[in-house]
Image (cartoon, rainbow, N blue to C red):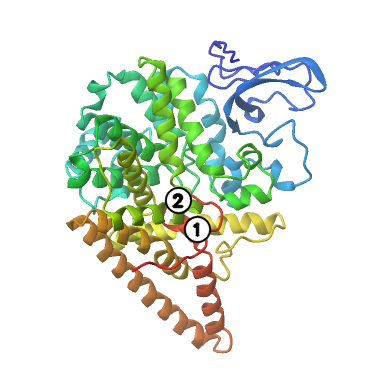
Amino acid sequence: MEVCYQLPVLPLDRPVPKHVLSRRGAISFSSSSSLFGAPDPRQLSQRRGAISYDSSDQTALYIRMLDVRVRSQVGFEPERRSSHPYLYIDFRTLHTRLDYGSTSASSAPERRVHRLLSFQRYLHSSRLLRGVPQQIPLHILDEDYTGQARCMLEKVGNWNFDIFLFDRLTNGNSLITLTFHLLNQYGLVELFQLDMVKLWRFLVMVQEDYHSDNPYHNAIHAADVTQAMYCYMREPTLAKSLTSCDILLGLLAAATHDLDHPGVNQPFLIKTDHYLATLYRNTSVLENHHWKSAVGLLRETGLFSHLPAEDSLNMERELGSLILATDISRQNEYLSRFRRHLDQENLCLSNGSHRHFILQMALKCADICNPCRPWELSKQWSEKVTEEFFQQGDIEKKHKLEVSPLCDRGINTVGNIQIGFMTYVAEPLFAEWARFSDTRLSQTMLGHMGLNKASWGSLQQEQTSVSEEAEPSSAGTDTEEAAATAARRNSNTATAAGGTSSKEIPQGSRES
């Protein structure tokens, strides 16, 4: 049973009544304030989904929706009780708390009131909060930057597409602009009779629900994966086989595959007894959350509400199947199945299930394609994901937790993480993809990966030489131990090139 109420827009200068907890049209009532403390709207838990009753007050009705958004500082889930200190930390402030000089924390209250605004005011406030200087006329930015962005979109199918430059040219709106352009270019907006306002609102909300504080798992990464997915779907073998529905699902899955990623991995959620780990029973925790978050936005915006209910539900299921395939703990499962198909030469892309499987493999490749990009782009991604690792390690140290593998900035380097990841995860996957689609793009990706791996090896040797000169007795041993750790922990290094963090997987041996 689902209950929804339409809330009036509340004046921003008036406090929210403490019996009202609002989130995108869902409200909850409580006669007890002990669970939530002061009625500051910045400290209100915001939940969506099913109906439940507070055990201490049977008349208190909480109306929730499944995708849990917690931005308060009183805990992730009011009903739960745990002595673990991490449960009292908000994901949105994990990184800003460590950087006391950061100004992002000051904008947090403004971000929290976005959902109370009308759609047009929300878009306007979003642009301002992303840092457009008010003293610069917006039309100047439109004429200059937007023009250059349009030029880049003409070459959106190029493998050397610079998503970082594109994000700057679109003023931080790379995911919205890129995804909308691709959907329109394929004619999917008209074909599926998508409402333009609903589509734009959906894309805005998707981009906003990526955490900009994450060095790696943010909207730019989602835009990069979407662009890579587009490149793969243009490959001759796929281009002549995919249906319009396949293309729509592929692009939407790429854009939402890491939606609301908290910037920490699954083992971290499990060992801190996070509610998401409990909700999904420690299985594909992040991937399930990304999928459910995407479904929540689809239903909230009503993007597919004009379709028959059965078709809409089927698209949601197919979307989930694609996103769940990015779980690195199932890497060997998917790779082995892919090899069997290629060995037996029995892939038939006129078969819907086979096409869907290839879309899953394409999304897996797009998700971890960073080592296959040109060095200038690949190096930036590597540094960003390593910094996200290290930030998690800093949090673990701060709260007296065991530091996760590869998350200790004192003993790991970008190079050893990347070399281990490419050796045990990326190379086997892209070698099989090249067997499936032996094209210029596949050979280019393998070539870039080989050069990038050699470049990281050279940098490692230079760093080792410098360390040995400074501390000849211990530096060499430390470097060898760090490299060995990187090789053994390939499940964590999977995130280093865009894979979602998950449980550790066995290395396996690459089949010839």
Q: Is residue 303 visible?
A: no
Residue 162: horizontal and vertical position, in percent? 27, 51
> Nearer the N terminus, badge 1 or badge 2?
2
> Mark 1 falls on what kind of element?
helix
Residue holding disc 2: 216
Where is the N terminus found, in terms of image quarters? top right
Q: Is 423 rendered above or below residue 400?
A: below
- Distance from disc 1 to disc 2, alpha carbons, whole Å, reads 8 Å
Residue at (49%, 47%) from the top-left corner? 214
Task: Say which residue appears at 17% left-offset and 46% top-offset.
Answer: 236
Judge left or right: residue 336 versus residue 479: left
Up-down: is 61 above or below 280? above
* 313 is higher (above) or lower (below) than 279: above
If the image is split into quadrants, where does the C terminus sit?
Answer: bottom left
Q: Amino acid at mark 2?
A: Tyr
**Residue nearer the viewer, 375 or 51:** 51
Q: Is residue 326 left or right of residue 479?
A: left
Q: Residue at label 1?
A: 387
Q: Residues within 10 Å of mark 1 (few under 14, many from 20)?
A: many
Amino acid type of the residue tagged 1 in the rendering: Glu
Looking at the rendering, which quadrant does residue 8 occupy?
top right
Q: How many marks?
A: 2
Q: Are marks 1 and 2 in contact (CB under 8 Å)?
A: yes
Residue 221 in view here:
yes
Residue 63's place in the image compared with 83, above or below, is above
Q: Position of residue 390 (x, y in %)?
A: 55, 59
